[in-house]
Image (tube, rainbow, N blue to C red):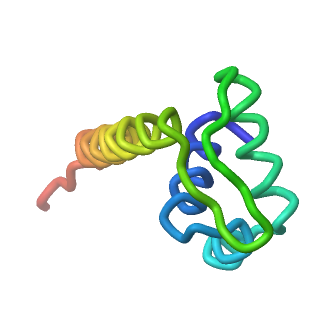
Amino acid sequence: MDKLEQYRVFIQVADMGSFIKAAHALELPRATVSSAVQQLETGLGTRLLHRTTRHVQLTADGAILLERARRLLADAAELNLSLIHISEPTRLLS
């Protein structure tokens, strides 16, 4: 799973407050969702979420990442749309 997808998964978990709910919303196995967040935490060297058996809460670092990851994904989507628009073939009128 690439870094952008890990950010998407993290955002969904943070928004829903649950790994299970995020997994259902993303149509991914719970283990995949949990692994994505763990890989993200390991790569960043910080804990992003406080986990309990019933609830998930952002840590201070998690709150910072959530805000920045939202902007990053919005920018990536905007860039993608602009490139799709530019690369659309023009149609010749006959």
Total marks placed: 0
In-image side of 27 versus 89 (left or right): right
> From the viewer's perspective, is residue 46 above or below residue 60?
above
In-image side of 81 versus 27 (left or right): left
Residue at 53 percent across and 58 percent down: it is 14
Residue at 76 percent across and 68 percent down: it is 28
Where's residue 78, x and y in %? Answer: 28, 45
Residue at 57 percent across and 56 percent down: it is 57
Where's residue 24, x and y in %? Answer: 69, 78
Quarter containing the N terminus: top right
Outermost residue to the right: 31
Outermost residue to the left: 93
> From the viewer's perspective, is residue 24 above or below residue 84?
below
> From the viewer's perspective, is residue 6 above or below residue 9?
above
Q: Nearer the viewer, residue 10 or 49?
A: 49
Q: Nearer the viewer, residue 61 or 21?
A: 61
Where's residue 77, x and y in %? Answer: 36, 47
Where's residue 25, x and y in %? Answer: 61, 76
Quarter containing the C terminus: bottom left
Q: Nearer the viewer, residue 87 or 10?
A: 10
